[in-house]
Image (cartoon, helix red, strand yellow):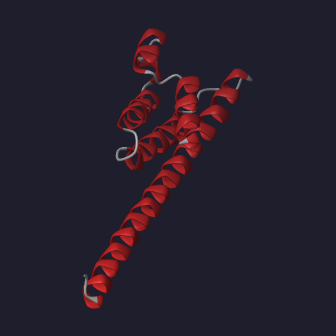
Amino acid sequence: MIEPTTAFTLFDKTLSVLGLIREQKKQRTEKIDQALLALFAALTETRSYLSDLQNGKPTDKERQFAIARLWNTASVPLREIDRDLAERCFLKGGYWMEPEAWDQKQIEAKGIAIDSVFEATRQLLLK
């Protein structure tokens, strides 16, 4: 027969473990939310800029650098959640530093086309 103090000790330890698991899950959810917010900021600004270019506005190097920073910033919280997507965001930041150095074949090979990154972001949202 288990003594009452032993039973309470086991119960307390079980509750502690469950609390730790719940806290880790909450922290992971917060990290995913931070990553998604950073990704959406980069996607929104990139799409806005691409739309402006398609509507005849001139190239804006400062805006491209700002977009590069958004993609690099988005890559940081992603590294613990989705390493592949983090790498793609980092490369996308590099692309926006020098878009003329990339051709369509390289963009597709690295998976950094805007639609490709958008779809990966959507998949992360659904996790």
Q: Residue at x 67, y 35 (%)?
A: 48
Q: Position of residue 117 (x, y in %)?
A: 52, 29
Q: Residue at x 47, y 24 (%)?
A: 112
User: In the picture shown, does residue 8 fall above or below 56?
Assistant: below
Q: Residue 122 is drawn in which quadrant?
A: top right
Q: Quadrant of the N terminus?
A: bottom left
Q: Position of residue 45 (x, y in %)?
A: 61, 40
Give the residue at the far right of this rendering. 55
User: In the picture shown, does residue 51 fall above or below 80?
Assistant: above
- Tell me how many marks there are: 0
Q: Residue at x 34, y 79 (%)?
A: 11
User: In the picture shown, does residue 4 fall above or below 13?
Assistant: below
Nearer to us in this view, 59 or 88: 88
Q: Position of residue 125 (x, y in %)?
A: 57, 42
Q: Residue 75 is drawn in which quadrant?
A: top left
Nearer to us in this view, 116 or 21: 21
Q: Is residue 57 left or right of residue 68?
A: right
Q: Residue at x 43, y 56 (%)?
A: 28
